[in-house]
Amino acid sequence: LTNALLLMEYFVNCNTSTLAPYTNALSKEQVQHLYRRLGFSASIPTVNGQVGQNAGPLVDTLINQAINAQPIPAPAWATWNNSNYPADDDAARALRRAQRDEFSLDYTNSMLNNNLSERLSFFWSNHFVTELDVYECNAFLYEYFNCLQRNSIGNFRTFVSEIGLTSAMLYYLDGVFNNGNNPNENYGRELYELFTLGDENGYTENDIIETAKALTGYVERGELGCEAVLFNPERHDAGSKTIFGQTGNWGYDDVINVLFTQRPTEIATFICRKLYEFFVHPDSKEDFVNNTIIPAMAATFVASNFEIAPVLSQLFKSQHFFDDEAIGVIIKSPFDVYFNFIKETNFTYTDTTVETAVNYSDLLGQTLFDPVDVAGWERDRNWVNTNFMIGRWLTMLDIVEGFYTVDDEQFRTFAMDAVGPANHGTSNPEIVVQAIVNKLTSKGMYTQAEFDNCMSAFKKDDIPEIYYGPDYIDGGQSLWILNVTPSVPDQVRLLIRHLTRQPEFQLK
């Protein structure tokens, strides 16, 4: 555990590559890096199919897939209010719980299947934070996530405007209590501090006070409960307000217009820094990144009128993104740990597998639909305290054993996919171990001793060394052959169990 935590101490960002396009053929390591960052990783056949390709067309494909991805279709209960539920409280609670479980499964399956689009919607859910246990309404939950999915790679200005009027956000940050005669400053403060500008960056306390007045009026909550929030002009402050030095009879749309007109560079810098830290490296304060990369991304963001796709395209196609210093430097979130493993092994999974992964993520501090507070999950180093590390080991052990119980031969298949067709009949266990290590970690094992430990885990204590024989090196007949020997699935299982406890496995 100590070694794991030491290895995952904060990485200093030494990446000095530029945002110039990366034009070399992509290696397997780089393709895996791309899929781990832009989605929840990919299977061996998917990765192998892109090795040797140019980054530009592959990134274009992934971005276009995200742009064209469709939101989850509206469930039957998407517009329900409390009157649609049974009068019996227990029955109503059970039905609400079943609906949330249904939506959770739909969304997490979409995360597994849709690469960048849901990687982004999940990212934005930790930026424009709401907590389901605060507003407790399934219809609001669907509206909120529909907004995230529709706007995840669209126009950020439109995104900010729409997300602020979702009922989930209006309830979560007290917009429903923001009356003209008694303004509530909560949403106005977070709009600037967390959603667009960053803490104490380009706004004053008076800007917040005046913004709160401009946002008043979205207070009509209905009488049935769980009804969409509506605007009441009689509850809006119709007086003059001064925001960022601009004076007028401002309302909600005016706030968005004044904000993006008066503070474009501040917004772009703040958002591009968050995108950089999420997709490239948690350290964006090193001089080169802070003074060169982030400003260049921000300039692209402003020039494209706050379209998200162009700035992501610039970043993902760049020499900076594919630099070796960017690979394997982000600590996996709980969802990364489980979903990356499912995708990378290509093991057969069921809805139960996905639900188990969601439940385990909850145990490790990442609760779907419920970030810890308005600032969201802190990410990275916070995922690997002592308790969470032990939790990762134990839960991954259960995941691995579950796959093995269902079909042990898929572990042999995974190993054969990893080594490639030319080595399906190999008698050299080192080839197999190296291939699996390379697939499940970003850069392999850090030391020879660690790799030797992987070899020991694979070769099993109850199989004598002579079983592999000296002949496998000379090409003679061996007692151990990858695609034949009965013990191979169990050996792969033991290797994977060992790997999931290593610090290298925790990184992407």
Image (tube, rainbow, N blue to C red):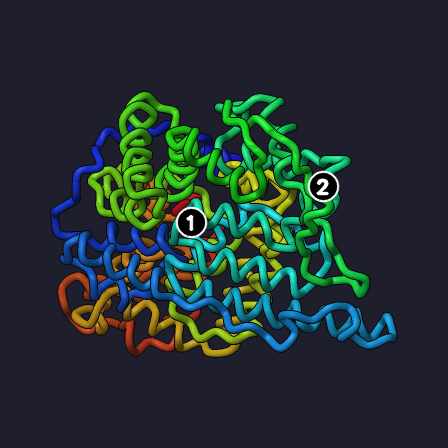
Q: Position of residue 109 (x, y in %)?
A: 49, 69
Q: Which residue is found at the position 65% from the left and 35% from the top?
A: 212
Label 2, label 1: how far apart the Cα atoms are = 47 Å
Task: Report the front residue among 209 and 113.
Answer: 209
Task: Report the front residue among 245 and 464.
Answer: 245
Task: Report the front residue among 180 and 402.
Answer: 180
Q: Which residue is found at the position 62% from the left and 22% from the top?
A: 205
Can see residue 455? no
Q: Is residue 163 left or right of residue 465?
A: right
Viewer-side label of 2, 1: 2
- Secondary structure at badge 2 equals loop
Corner quadrant of residue 456: bottom left
Q: Looking at the rendered structure, which numbered label has been put on residue 178?
A: 2
Q: Position of residue 351 (x, y in %)?
A: 55, 74
Q: Which residue is found at the position 34% from the left and 29% from the top?
A: 13
Q: Position of residue 355 (x, y in %)?
A: 59, 67
Q: Looking at the rendered structure, which numbered label has been put on residue 505?
A: 1
429 to 284, vertically: above or below: below
284 to 481, vertically: above or below: above
Amino acid under disc 2: Asn
Q: Residues within 10 Å of mark 2 (few under 14, many from 20)?
A: many
Marked residue nearer the N-terminal end (2 or 1)? 2
Q: Is residue 474 left or right of residue 429?
A: left
Amino acid under disc 1: Phe
Corner quadrant of residue 480: bottom left
Q: Position of residue 425 (x, y in %)?
A: 22, 73
- Secondary structure at badge 1 equals helix
Q: Looking at the rendered structure, which numbered label has been put on residue 232?
A: none
